[in-house]
């Protein structure tokens, strides 16, 4: 289950985990471009309302958030120090919900 909205999150830096880079590398060039566009929007302040930014319930220390890239492609994110986004994964909706 998720909670929609950024809740005052203002991101200033994006860090890509090894797992994210592996997932990203497997995407085709069109999907990579869509992921890149979504990440640029995440760095805007405030985060645009058109971005579906959600907090996953049940995850504490760290809190896990997701962002929809397409209808079925999501990015999972850990927020560090209130303004750094650690990109954990980019994968299909079901994969992110099962293993963010």
Image: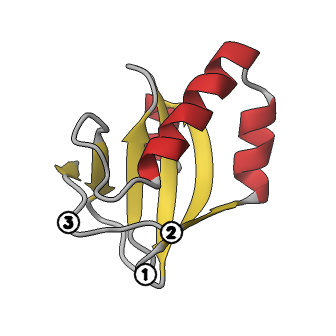
Residue contact at pointers 2 and 3, CB within 8 angstroms: no
Q: Residue at x 66, y 14 (%)?
A: 30
Can you give x and y, in whole percent of width and height, for residue 55 in the image?
A: 29, 57
Callout 3 secondary element = loop
x, y percentage for residue 44?
Answer: 40, 53
Say whether marks 3 and 1 touch (CB < 8 Å). no
Can residue 43 be seen here? The reply is: yes
Give the mark toward the camera: 2 or 3.
2
Q: Which residue is mark 2?
A: 12
Residue 81: percent from left, percent from top: 47, 85
Q: Mark 2 vs mark 3: which is more N-terminal?
A: 3
Circle 3 or circle 1, nearest the eye: 3
Reading the image, the residue beneath label 1 is 61
User: Which of the marked residues, 3 or 1, is nearer the chain's N terminus?
Assistant: 3
Return the residue at label 3.
7
The residue at 38%/57% (across/down) is 65
Q: Which sits in the foreground, 11 or 4?
A: 11
- Taking 89 as reference, is 21 left or right? right
When the figure is inspected, residue 48 is found, relative to residue 5, above or below; the finding is above
Residue 61 versus residue 2 in the image, above or below: below
26 left or right, relative to 57: right
**In front: 29, or 23?**
29
Tag in front: 2 or 1: 2
């Amino acid at each position: 289950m998720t909670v929609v909205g950024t809740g005052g999150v203002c991101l200033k830096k994006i860090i890509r985990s090894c797992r994210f880079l592996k997932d990203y590398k497997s995407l085709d060039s069109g999907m990579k471009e869509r992921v890149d566009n979504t990440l640029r929007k995440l760095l805007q302040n405030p985060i645009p309302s058109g971005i579906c930014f959600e907090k996953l319930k049940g995850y504490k220390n760290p809190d896990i958030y997701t962002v929809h890239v397409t209808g079925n492609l999501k990015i999972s994110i850990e927020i560090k120090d209130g303004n750094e986004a650690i990109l954990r994964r980019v994968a299909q909706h079901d994969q992110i919900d099962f293993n963010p």
